Amino acid sequence: MSLEEVAKRSGVSTATVSRVLNGVAVVKSSTRARVMKAAAELKYHPNLHARNLAGGRSRTIGVIVSNLDNPFFLDVYRALEEDCHSHDYEVLVANTAYSSKQLIAAIRLMIGRRVTGLAVIVSEMEDAIVRELTESQLPTVLYDVGAAGGNITKIRVNYRQGVERIVEYLAALGHQKMSFIGHHTVLGPLDERRRALFDTVRVVCPNATVRVAVDGDSLDGGRQAVREILSSGPAPTVIICVNDLMAVGALKELRDRGIRVPQDVSVTGFDNIKLSEFCCPALTTVHIPRDRIGHSLFTSLAPGSNGATSVGKELVIDPEFVVRDSTGPARK
Amino acid sequence: MSLEEVAKRSGVSTATVSRVLNGVAVVKSSTRARVMKAAAELKYHPNLHARNLAGGRSRTIGVIVSNLDNPFFLDVYRALEEDCHSHDYEVLVANTAYSSKQLIAAIRLMIGRRVTGLAVIVSEMEDAIVRELTESQLPTVLYDVGAAGGNITKIRVNYRQGVERIVEYLAALGHQKMSFIGHHTVLGPLDERRRALFDTVRVVCPNATVRVAVDGDSLDGGRQAVREILSSGPAPTVIICVNDLMAVGALKELRDRGIRVPQDVSVTGFDNIKLSEFCCPALTTVHIPRDRIGHSLFTSLAPGSNGATSVGKELVIDPEFVVRDSTGPARK
DNA sequence: TTGAAAGCGCTACCAG
DNA sequence: CTGGTAGCGCTTTCAA
């Protein structure tokens, strides 16, 4: 089941078979037909490793994410995949489960596969890794970490802006006792959100207090974080969640305890994943256009018609505040 | 950045470099050190395509699923990935979005990559595809479709049993006006569930009626299907959903309309994804052990110590009925 | 313990 | 329009 066997069976050279299979160069249609027939009869499937090796190219974009379970990543992935497929590229996904070790392994794997470009959407990025990527020459898009330039494009979401809207809105509603739940990550976007929160609170409502709890990035994690908040001090009047997934978990715990949302406590999410409309109450959140992110990934990574990638820039994405039913006036 | 450059820099042959990098054969430790050093300095990353080509192997398991968005698939994937990584295998995922065309493309890709084994967890399987897979010789696991034997292992979930529990339970609660919402698929597991439902109803509660609506396999799809049900006839007292994801969507639509669950209408899901515990009300559903499925995938596909895969069997997985808060007595 | 060399399957360049 | 052939980068005997 190799090119050579197909060549033999159809009485032509391997070169011609290759031409036919790749639709390149003009091959006499009778010859073409013969080759196609032979390939079909032999159930021939080209060895992609050989093809990539010989061709040097790979037409593959790699994506590494922290947590495929979070719909946020899937939405980005879907948009990217759409572009890739319509331009005849493949996508290779890798999941790190927030582990640096797995991140490194994933990066090595992508480099080893000689991907055309690599998108790294994780929050466990360490400086050393960013440096290695920078030195690797591989066209890369980093999400909310590192600096643009050279082979690196940075996509930055303006979290600060989103957080500001949330805080301003809550402050106007009279909330003073706030809490924040996030997940275990010291670096990257997450901490950015936490820091932005504290900074904003300091400016907008200096009298407000903010208690923090962290747990896993999952429904269970959100629920657990709320337990921690509730058992470690006076009940807050608002729970600001680092993302919608954890917020939905938080909602569950509150409901189980008979704490009403938003009457007793307000809850906010972040990301605006589909689920945020379907939980109850529907979440007040901040929309982040995952589709735009996904499409930007492709645009930056895939070589344009001129043959060059457009990496090296910094793309800023502005979020949008969405008010739904999980927030209300602070309880007296 | 090729093996040869590393060899040159460390003053040994490519063969030796290969040995060092693969930890095979005994290499003098001083030589080994020199090679390692050179590789590091050169930031050498082995070309995986060349490696696979030369080695013939690939230590990669491919998985093709219909809808990565449905947590069900992710759970299966995660279990499989865990096994793969701990046995030094890679996993390659492909998403078909329920399209036969994409399924075929994905299969070709997997074969082209010469994966060790392939798991196909989709519901858009056509006979022709099953046949092609059977003839391909590639160790394959099919989910709820096709027949075991040869290079094919079939994993079958005993849906019928799950559906029976649901119907018996609902019938005992006095429900007579039932409805079923599923997604667009004529073949595979889905239709199995629908047929099982009708068969069971006929036996358990012949007086009951069942209306059907189908839409996409998503939160929106579930909501939409409920709209269809509600606008096309008398309100049912129970809505049986083909899976939890659609059930959560259904719940949302009911809530928006002020229809109480379970007082006005009962709702059941299927799969027991994590979300089914977190929605409100928590879903009565049928648990399907995705982790077991994932682990079985690996066991069947990865060659054992004897070097042979254990494909060819049929594995039956029994579901388990889980009662939560979305079901109650039929409204008079 | 190490080197030389024969491929793995395919592409691409050069002739014809 | 088609064939010959030199690699692509790595693994793997076979000798040394």
Image: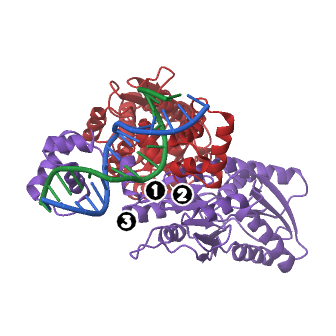
Chain colours: A purple, B red, C blue, D green
Q: Are marks 1 and 2 in contact (CB under 8 Å)?
A: yes
Give the amino acid at mark 3.
His
Q: Amino acid at mark 2?
A: Val
- Residue at left 47%, top 45%? B92
Q: Nearer the viewer, residue A179 or A141?
A: A141
Q: Amino acid at mark 1?
A: Val
Few, some or many residues within 10 Å of mark 3 (<14, 14–19, 20+): few
Tell me if mark 1 has few (under 14), some (14-19) or many (20+) residues whose alpha carbon lies within 10 angstroms of its own.
Answer: many
Closer-to-camera residue (B165/B278): B278
Which mark is drawn over residue A63? 2
* Residue holding disc 3: A87
Where residue B172 appears, as percent x and y from the top left, is: 51, 31
- Where is residue B71 drawn, in percent x and y? 54, 47
**Label at residue A91:** 1
* Rendered-image quadrant of the C terminus of chain A: bottom right
Residue A202: % across, % down: 86, 76
Image position, residue A42 (x, y; %): 21, 39
